[in-house]
């Protein structure tokens, strides 16, 4: 934290602009060594949050490296709460790299992944949930996912966790006052009052964890497998959902020999659609491996689209696949209804959608059913929910500790034991916000950021 870091903060490649960012106490002095203004402006003497035109030059040879705009932002009103300088170069990779190399020669250190955001967290400008939301905004695949991440960046998750944490602190204070000051004749805490408070905390935790099921779907996406026999129209279905010809479609069985994977946005939910090899008994080694992978994908998928061919009707292998499927996350998709609209079969409670992938019929109904199946009957995801698996796991540990506290109250455990449960709950909640998060977890979180953010 005592040194000055620098990195390229825009994607590498050709573009209109490229930005080299510096953060730290030496940011302005380093930039001043290599910046030349036509008006002889000194960056160290300039007001904060201003942009200046000039050139980046080599301090020893006075060679002009690039024509730039330099932004000066002085602590503490900056992203990291440190002095920040951003050098806006022309967007060619050579120009940006040469400016970065010059900055490093003057004493800056190359920033690690997420180190700017890590400094913002360590300097208290944002908590850990907000820092993680920055990465979620960058990696968002849908507008709804981005909106949810923006809400978290503005503190929607932090406020909910902080509210629950304050309730646990208040409950802990009641018990520990009785433990620590027995000579003060403090009345023992009312069991009914503590039970009521603890049950309210448990209820709020349960609501957050339940809501997180939708949030994780929004952030992580839905692993969706298209499964079926050869030539039932699996690749045609993938192409229809994507509205483009992504997979090769032929009448030859075994055309698809590996898993083809693409994302499709349905009602703001990113579905990770996987077209698989047709499942059948085969001798060809490559096709046999494709079938093995298809079965593995089917077993691991969050949602299965089991495709049947209306043109040729049901066979024993179709029925066997249905028998291996789980009703709660499988949709029977009857394809090629342009050839035959009726299949007289009972599907024992599985949701059934009839389509023609070739003529794009029934796709809206299929998409609606996909969303409802994955959301348990709901039509769309909520945005103000927990979306991070790390947060969910910490909330579950909190809930377990609170439940242990409630059970201890009922069993008449001494206050000293009850206090331990509450402290474990506080530790888990603090881990979400970054108050009690171990260093290795922090390092892992920021290591997943891009360099320059």
Image (cartoon, rainbow, N blue to C red):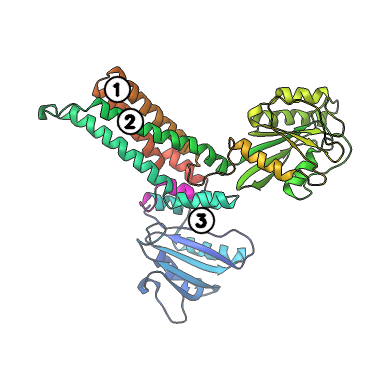
Q: Residue at x 38, y 69 (%)?
A: 48
In magenta segment, residue 402: no
Q: Which mark is residue 1?
A: none
What residue span does the magenta drawing correspond to?
A: 122-133
In the picture of the structure, the residue carrying the numbered disc 1 is 409
Q: Residue at x 78, y 40 (%)?
A: 355
Mark 2 surroundings within 10 Å by alpha-carbon count, few (fewer than 14), some (14 through 19), many (20 or more): many
Q: Quadrant of residue 214?
A: top right
Query: How far apart, in angstroms, are the residues tagged by discs 3 and 2?
Result: 44 Å
What secondary structure is found at the residue carrying circle 2? helix
In magenta segment, residue 129: yes
Q: Quadrant of residue 177?
A: top left
Would you say 40 lies left or right of 187 here? right
Residue 67 lies, in percent from the top left, at 54, 74
Which of label 3 and label 1 is nearer to you? 1
Which of label 3 and label 2 is nearer to you? 2
Q: Which mark is residue 198?
A: 2
Instruction: Please say if the residues under marks 1 and 2 sit with CB atoms less than 8 Å apart.
Output: yes
Query: Mark 2 or mark 3, which is nearer the start of the sequence?
Result: 2
Query: How far apart, in angstroms, are the residues tagged by discs 1 and 2?
Result: 10 Å
Q: Residue at x 79, y 29 (%)?
A: 279
Mark 1 surroundings within 10 Å by alpha-carbon count, few (fewer than 14), some (14 through 19), many (20 or more): some
Query: Mark 1 or mark 3, which is nearer the start of the sequence?
Result: 1
Instruction: Please say if the residues under marks 3 and 2 sit with CB atoms less than 8 Å apart.
Output: no
On screen, residue 340 above or below 63: above
Query: Mark 2 or mark 1, which is nearer the start of the sequence?
Result: 2
On screen, residue 102 above or below 212: below
In the picture of the structure, the residue carrying the numbered disc 3 is 452
What secondary structure is found at the residue carrying circle 3? loop
């Amino acid at each position: 934290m005592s040194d000055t870091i620098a990195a390229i903060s825009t994607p590498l490649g050709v573009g209109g602009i490229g930005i080299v960012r510096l953060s730290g106490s030496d940011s302005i002095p380093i930039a001043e060594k290599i910046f030349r203004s036509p008006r002889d402006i000194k960056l160290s003497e300039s007001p904060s949050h201003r942009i200046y035109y000039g050139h980046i030059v080599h301090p020893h040879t006075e060679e002009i490296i690039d024509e730039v705009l330099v932004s000066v932002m002085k602590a503490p009103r900056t992203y990291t709460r440190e002095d920040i300088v951003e050098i806006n170069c022309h967007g060619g990779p050579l120009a940006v790299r040469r400016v970065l190399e010059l900055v490093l020669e003057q004493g800056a250190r190359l920033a690690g992944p997420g180190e700017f955001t890590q400094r913002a967290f360590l300097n208290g400008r944002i908590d850990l949930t907000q820092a993680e939301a920055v990465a979620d905004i960058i990696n968002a695949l849908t507008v709804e996912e981005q909106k949810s991440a923006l809400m978290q960046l503005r503190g929607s998750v932090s406020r909910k966790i902080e509210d629950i944490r304050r309730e646990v602190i208040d409950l802990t204070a009641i018990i520990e006052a009785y433990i620590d000051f027995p000579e003060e004749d403090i009345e023992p805490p009312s069991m009914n009052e503590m039970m009521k408070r603890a049950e309210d905390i448990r209820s709020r935790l349960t609501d957050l964890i339940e809501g997180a099921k939708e949030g994780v779907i929004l952030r992580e996406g839905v692993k969706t497998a298209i499964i079926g026999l050869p030539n039932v129209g699996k690749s045609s279905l993938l192409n229809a959902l994507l509205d483009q010809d992504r997979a090769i479609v032929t009448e030859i069985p075994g055309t698809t020999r590996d898993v083809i994977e693409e994302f499709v946005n349905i009602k703001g939910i990113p579905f990770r659609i996987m077209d698989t090899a047709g499942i059948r008994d085969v001798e060809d080694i490559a096709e046999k491996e494709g079938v093995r992978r298809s079965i593995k994908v089917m077993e691991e998928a969050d949602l299965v689209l089991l495709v049947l061919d209306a043109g040729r009707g049901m066979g024993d292998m179709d029925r066997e696949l249905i028998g291996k499927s789980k009703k709660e996350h499988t949709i029977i998709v009857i394809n090629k209804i342009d050839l035959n609209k009726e299949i007289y079969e009972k599907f024992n409670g599985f949701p059934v959608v009839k389509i023609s992938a070739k003529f794009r019929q029934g796709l809206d109904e299929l998409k609606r059913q996909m969303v409802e199946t994955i959301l348990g009957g709901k039509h769309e995801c909520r945005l103000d929910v927990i979306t991070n698996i790390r947060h969910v796991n910490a909330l579950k540990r909190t809930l377990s500790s609170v439940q242990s506290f409630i059970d201890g109250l009922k069993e008449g455990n001494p206050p000293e034991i009850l206090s331990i449960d509450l402290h474990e709950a506080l530790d888990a909640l603090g881990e979400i916000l970054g108050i009690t998060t171990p260093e290795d977890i922090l390092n892992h979180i920021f290591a997943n950021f891009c360099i320059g953010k």
